[in-house]
């Protein structure tokens, strides 16, 4: 889309400390270049990533979200990612029901050894979101709240 | 005196301090707290009774210290089974009764008895719910978003959906948490939606599909559709049947190593 050629997507990544954060670190130390649109938020575990954080990211202007952690059976806390996966299944379904654009939420498993996979994940997410354009649909509703806030 | 009233009098004489049931209201039967034998004649129980009485059972200020009997309809039984599995009710302190399809009064002593009774009453969506489901399923994602934001924009944040829900028993709800303030306390479309997403997410694998939230909504937002639809969509995946609370924990507090992950890249 032409009007989006200048559009730089705003991506928030919620990642776990033990795998994906270390993986993203490896991407850097391996000197792999990847899109700079991503803001990484580090969590102790994917099990700690509350669904409200995703909604707040959208409300705060994110056009896309990455949620990533250890592969199944690799969780530092044994089962955090298994619990997270169940929650994502439910959340994914619910977001779809209320009409939130679930294509903008990307779930992934990236281990501490997968620096290249992290670069790929970010690059492909940025490319996708660039194609979808800014998430104005959600941001407009969020702006309404901000306006009310300023009247307080 | 009808059969229900006679039974209630007997229960009160046996030492129950409260019999929970229904009495005639303006339009339909409404919940009734019967504490005296003279009041028992007001009690009714039929298919017009829809309120889920289980919501009162987790409120000690209403139940008091004595023994309580409750005339439960099917959805109340489902709620009682789920609440018991979540350690919110002690069945030894309760007398649970229902009216069977044969119009007989049946008393339940254990959770297993309730479960086996419920296993013969399949959970189904009503015709109006099926119609709404068809309408929404036929919409594109953008249309669905417009539909729900428009619905949620009418929400007045009264939290009647929360108050009516037998499964919403937290003493401190996330809406009362203000550090950080997850959900703005005043009504506005976005936080209204965020509240509903919270409510439904907290009910995943716990909702028994009684529809009390939707009936309680004073502005008529079909909030019950969301949790019922989730129930339907995920029951196969999670193996959850309303009223048959999972033995090894609720859907979101347990997992299978081979849970579906076709949406994870």
Image (cartoon, coloured by chain):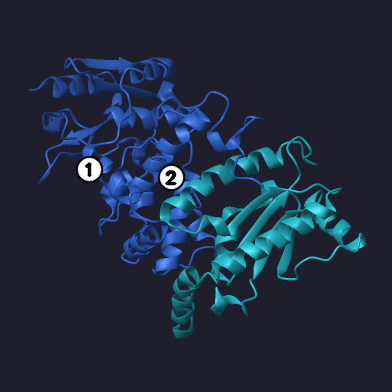
Chain colours: A cyan, B blue
Give the label, 2 or 1, closer to the camera: 1
B116 sits left or right of B236 in the view: left
The label on residue B168 is 2
Q: Position of residue B79 (x, y in %)?
A: 38, 32
Q: What residue would you read off at disc 1?
A: B128
Asked if the residue at tag 1 contacts the one at tag 2, i.e. Cβ–Cβ closer than 8 Å, the answer is no
Q: For label 1, count other residues whose C-alpha is less than 10 Å away and answer few (under 14), some (14-19) or many (20+).
A: few
Marked residue nearer the N-terminal end (2 or 1): 1
The label on residue A83 is none
Q: Position of residue B20 (x, y in %)?
A: 26, 32
Q: Secondary structure at mark 2?
A: loop
Q: Residue at x 76, y 36 (%)?
A: A78
What is the quadrant of residue A71 in the picture? top right
Q: Report the Cα–Cα distance between label 2 and label 1.
A: 25 Å
Is residue B71 among the parts visible in the rendering?
no
Q: Position of residue B188 (x, y in %)?
A: 40, 70
B51 vs B182: above or below: above
Q: For label 2, count other residues whose C-alpha is less than 10 Å away and answer few (under 14), some (14-19) or many (20+).
A: some
Q: Position of residue A65 (x, y in %)?
A: 63, 60
Looking at the rendered image, the quarter that the N terminus of chain B falls into is: top left
B100 vs B29: above or below: above
Is residue A69 among the parts visible in the rendering?
yes
In this rendered view, identify the residue nearer to me: A102 or B92.
Answer: A102
What is the chain identity of the residue bearing mark 1?
A: B
B126 vs B143: above or below: above
């Amino acid at each position: 889309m032409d009007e989006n050629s200048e559009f730089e997507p705003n991506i928030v990544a919620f990642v776990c400390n033990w795998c994906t954060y270390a993986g993203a670190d490896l991407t850097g130390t391996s000197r792999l270049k990847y899109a700079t649109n991503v803001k990484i938020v580090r969590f102790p575990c994917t099990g700690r990533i509350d669904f409200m954080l995703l909604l707040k990211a959208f409300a705060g202007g994110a056009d896309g979200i990455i949620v990533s952690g250890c592969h199944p059976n690799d969780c530092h806390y044994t089962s955090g990612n298994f619990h997270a996966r169940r929650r994502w299944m439910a959340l994914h379904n619910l977001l779809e029901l209320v009409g939130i654009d679930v294509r903008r939420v990307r779930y992934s498993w990236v281990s501490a050894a997968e620096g290249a996979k992290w670069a790929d994940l970010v690059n492909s997410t940025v490319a996708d979101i660039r194609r979808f354009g800014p998430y104005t649909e959600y941001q407009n509703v969020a702006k309404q709240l901000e306006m009310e806030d300023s009247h307080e | 005196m009808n059969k229900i009233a006679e039974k209630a009098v007997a229960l009160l004489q046996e030492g129950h301090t409260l019999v929970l049931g229904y009495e005639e209201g303006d339009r339909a039967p409404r919940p009734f707290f019967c504490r005296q034998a003279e009041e028992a004649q007001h009690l009714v129980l039929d298919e017009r009774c829809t309120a889920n009485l289980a919501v009162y059972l987790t409120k000690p200020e209403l139940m008091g210290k004595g023994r309580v009997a409750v005339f439960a309809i099917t959805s109340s039984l489902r709620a009682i089974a789920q609440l018991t599995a979540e350690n919110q009710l002690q069945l030894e302190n309760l007398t649970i009764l229902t009216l069977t399809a044969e119009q007989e009064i049946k008393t339940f002593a254990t959770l297993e008895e309730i479960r086996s009774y419920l296993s013969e009453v399949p959970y189904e969506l009503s015709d109006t719910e099926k119609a709404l489901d068809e309408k929404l399923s036929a919409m594109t994602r953008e249309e669905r978003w417009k539909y729900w934001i428009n619905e949620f924009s009418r929400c007045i944040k009264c939290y009647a959906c929360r108050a009516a829900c037998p499964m919403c028993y937290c003493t401190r709800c996330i809406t009362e948490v203000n550090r950080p303030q997850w959900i703005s306390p005043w009504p506005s479309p976005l936080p209204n939606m965020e509240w509903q997403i919270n409510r439904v997410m907290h009910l995943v694998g716990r909702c028994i599909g009684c529809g009390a939230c939707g009936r309680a909504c004073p502005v008529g937002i079909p909030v019950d559709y969301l949790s019922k639809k989730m129930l339907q969509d995920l029951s196969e995946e999670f193996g959850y049947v309303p009223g048959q609370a999972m033995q090894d924990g609720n859907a979101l507090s347990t997992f299978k190593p081979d849970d579906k992950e076709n949406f994870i890249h």
